[in-house]
Image: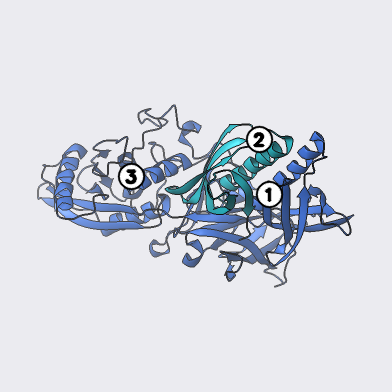
């Protein structure tokens, strides 16, 4: 698994439980990750809550740690650490 | 059932389950771990409820709000979450914390810039008669293992119970908030958490218990400097001939104002005096043409091409109305501008030179900023400017300006109410940068860098 750390520089919600999110230390240094779900109730719940967390982090300029596969942009875990 | 109260220190949301792990406590190293797990047998309502708790915890974490998590006596599974009501038995309540550098919203929506002079304002209510006077200390930290810096308030504040529960009167007066100036080391790029270390009754010297504490975390963003070359214009007129040049104060206050009001941490400024090639009374178009030629030579000789050139013309001999050579729609630091300067107050500016905000207006054009169109200026941006009358904010709970002051020039900190002060791109009195202009100039500065 890989981790991407930084501010949520941009967040685009595409549809319910689907979003593109750019995470990185600066607007010109980001990685594009995805929030997607398989349509199941559990995965949809995970994705929708994930988007809310990303939005809260973005609007409050709070850094996140997003975990995803080494060759996948799908976020499988999100962490907001203490300062 | 048991209840644990504290701040959300860490929150992890994992796809498996899905499951949330949340650490709640007073500090990162004194926190208890809890869990919210969505089970495969949970019905839709339960899933929605559990996800709602996770969202609430996330919002509490990023806004620094205290939470109560309810769980079993011997279980770490959270069964409900609440944001505690204010403890009304504590007379002193924290109403809000604002961290401002020039313009800010109570939600702290305006990005803070690394290295820029920063003031933390605490707004309090005191609900018991008679009122008290307090001072205090905050503690700031840039990471969970970083050292805590304790900072004393710059002032004491008189808390009038008649004003309890009302933030706007305190926000609109720098003397009615407890103000803290952050040291440069605390405004480095990255996060900073702000906690209240203590509030003291100035009459007794005793600590005063505080209710409704929040612990906001802010982020300081890197930002390019403003590079500006100030060209003082020398001209001679009259019989007998008298020579006029801008004074040192005109240059200094323009540099100071740009550093305080513009979205920059540093103003990289240089100055030169040149003789006008046009005969007075010349116009700003004449001066702009001369300055553009000077700039072209300077850049060819090695001057940083991102440098904006601005001409200052003393109003001692005549008043030269200012203008920019253009309003570029994209990065174009070669666009020059010029304007008048002198000691007039225009009815509201008593610092000794009006060339500061006037220069801020003309330089704003060189960053692509248009006239909002509310005080006699052209209505080029009327459709986009967000607030009527060119005001900085739409209400007392919206955006408000704050001048962090300049001790070198004897300029005190000042609150600039958003319902009184107007955007610098208008022709109105009481000019400052609105968030709209502040963020627009910042975007252009980044594009030029």
Where residue A29 sits: x, y (%)? Answer: 44, 50
Q: Secondary structure at mark 2?
A: loop
Residue at image coords 55%, 65%: B154
Residue at image coords 40%, 43%: B443
The residue wearing badge 2 is A38
Q: Earlier in the sequence, mark 1 or mark 3?
A: 1
- Identify the disc placed on residue B358: 3
| Circle 1 residues within 10 Å: few <14, some 14–19, many ≥20 | some
The residue wearing badge 1 is B14
Q: Nearer the viewer, residue B17 or B4?
A: B17
| Chain given the colour blue | B
Where, by quadrant of the figure, is residue B151 drawn? bottom right
Please indicate whether residue B319 sits to the left or right of residue B75 in the image: left
The tint of chain A in the picture is: cyan
In three-dimensional space, the C-alpha distance between marks 1 and 3, rounded to whole angstroms, equals: 54 Å
* Tag nearer the camera, 1 or 2: 2
Query: What is the chain identity of the residue bearing mark 3?
Result: B
Where residue B184 sits: x, y (%)? Answer: 47, 65
């Amino acid at each position: 698994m890989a981790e991407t750390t930084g501010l949520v520089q941009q967040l685009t919600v595409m549809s319910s439980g689907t979003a593109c999110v750019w995470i990185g230390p600066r607007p010109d240094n980001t990685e594009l990750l995805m929030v997607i779900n398989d349509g199941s109730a559990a995965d949809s719940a995970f994705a929708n809550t994930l988007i809310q967390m990303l939005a809260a982090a973005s609007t409050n300029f709070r850094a996140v740690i997003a975990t995803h596969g080494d060759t996948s942009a799908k976020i499988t875990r999100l962490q907001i650490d203490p300062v | 059932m048991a209840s644990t109260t504290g701040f959300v220190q860490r929150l992890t949301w994992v796809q498996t389950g899905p499951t949330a792990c949340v650490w709640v406590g007073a500090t990162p190293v004194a926190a208890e771990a809890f869990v919210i797990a969505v089970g495969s047998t949970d019905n839709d309502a339960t899933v929605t409820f559990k996800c709602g708790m996770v969202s609430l915890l996330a919002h509490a974490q990023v806004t620094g709000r205290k939470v109560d998590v309810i769980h079993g006596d011997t279980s770490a599974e959270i069964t409900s979450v609440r944001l505690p009501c204010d403890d009304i038995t504590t007379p002193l309540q924290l109403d809000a914390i604002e961290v401002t550098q020039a313009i800010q919203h109570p939600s702290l929506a305006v990005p803070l810039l690394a290295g820029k002079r920063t003031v933390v304002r605490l707004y309090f209510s005191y609900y018991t008669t008679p009122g008290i006077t307090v001072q205090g200390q905050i503690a700031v930290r840039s990471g969970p293992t970083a050292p805590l810096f304790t900072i004393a308030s710059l002032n004491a504040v008189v808390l009038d119970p008649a004003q309890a529960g009302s933030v706007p009167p305190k926000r609109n007066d720098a003397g009615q908030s407890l103000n803290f100036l952050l040291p440069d080391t605390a405004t480095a790029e990255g996060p900073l958490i702000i906690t209240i270390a203590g509030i003291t009754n100035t009459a007794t010297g005793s600590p005063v218990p505080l209710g409704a504490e929040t612990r906001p975390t802010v982020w300081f963003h890197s930002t390019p400097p403003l590079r500006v070359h100030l060209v003082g214009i020398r001209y001679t007129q009259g019989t007998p001939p008298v020579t006029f040049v801008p004074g040192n104060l005109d240059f200094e206050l323009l540099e100071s104002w740009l550093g305080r009001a513009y979205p920059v941490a540093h103003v990289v400024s240089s100055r030169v005096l040149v003789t006008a090639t046009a005969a007075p009374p010349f116009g700003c178009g004449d001066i702009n043409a001369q300055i553009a030629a000077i700039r072209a030579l300077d850049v060819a000789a090695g001057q940083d091409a991102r440098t904006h050139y601005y001409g200052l013309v003393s109003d001692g001999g005549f008043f030269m109305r200012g203008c920019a050579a253009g309003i570029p729609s994209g990065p174009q630091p070669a666009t020059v501008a010029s304007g008048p300067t002198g000691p007039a107050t225009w009815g509201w500016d008593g610092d000794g030179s009006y060339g500061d905000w006037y220069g801020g207006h003309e330089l704003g054009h060189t960053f692509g900023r248009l006239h909002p169109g509310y005080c006699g200026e052209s209505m080029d941006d009327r459709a986009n400017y967000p607030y009527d009358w060119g005001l900085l904010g739409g209400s007392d709970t919206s955006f408000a300006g704050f001048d962090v002051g300049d001790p070198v020039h004897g300029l005190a900190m000042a609150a600039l109410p958003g319902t009184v002060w107007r955007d610098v791109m208008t022709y109105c009195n009481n000019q400052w940068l609105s968030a709209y202009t502040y963020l627009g100039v910042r975007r252009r500065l980044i594009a030029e860098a």
